[in-house]
Amino acid sequence: MAAPMLRRLGGWWRVCGAGAGPPPPGAGYHARPLGLGLDRSWMPGPECPEWQRGARARRKLYGRLGSASGLPAACLWARPPLPPQPEPTLPELWARLAARQLESRNKERERQKLIAANMAKMPKMVEDWRREKRELKAKQREEKARRERLLTEARERFGYSIDPRNAKFQEMVKEIEKDEKKKLKMLKRRQKAEVAGSGEVTSAAAGPGHS
């Protein structure tokens, strides 16, 4: 950098003449080489970190320098390429084809079995679905009839129509359910008593005959 500057100063002195002062020194500046070896390609050594010695770094180095990098072409793969496999013979190819066809036929046979089993279950599944649908409709009808009966009873008790969400209506429903449970309990007791009484009568009627 210093040598070009001195050459420019020498040229300026020649143009301006002697009145410009003494000429600059004629010796130019020559820098000593730094000895960094920049003209040679840098190669990572064993002391370098992994990112400078890994597979990606080797690929970059081989792509930049080629065979001059001293690296084998096999280093471009993360794993060494597999050796060439022998070509299969014609009997081997036929055996593979027969195995695939046999496997395909077995799968198709299993699929047909599954379809047949499901079709055999279909009538029962349809009947169960229809029965559940009938039971649901019957339950909905019973619930609707019960709701209308409760509304009618509430209208008779209070003298006017009442909203089912009203607290009075809810209390009335609880009372009615309590009375229904009590009546059902009494009916079961009466039925048990009747069954017990009929059993005693049958025993008494059968007694003299056996004696």
Image: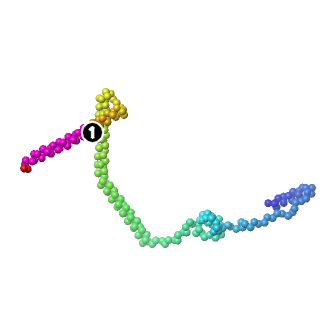
Query: Which is nearer the eye, 123 or 147?
Result: 147
Q: Amino acid at mark 1?
A: Lys
The magenta segment: 182-209
* The furthest residue to the top: 159
Q: Return the x and y of residue 95 as percentages of the image width and height.
A: 41, 70
Circle 1 is placed at which residue position? 181
Judged by its main secondary structure, the magenta piece is helix
Question: For residue 15, which quarter of the picture?
Answer: bottom right
**Dot 1: within a 10 Å radius of its alpha carbon, few (fewer than 14), some, or many (20 or more) residues?**
few
- The answer to whether residue 17 is seen in the rendering is no
* Residue under the point 36% across and 32% down: 166
- The answer to whether residue 38 is seen in the rendering is yes
* Residue under the point 78% across and 66% down: 32
Q: Secondary structure at mark 1?
A: helix
The verdict on residue 168 being magenta is: no
Question: For residue 184, which quarter of the picture?
Answer: top left
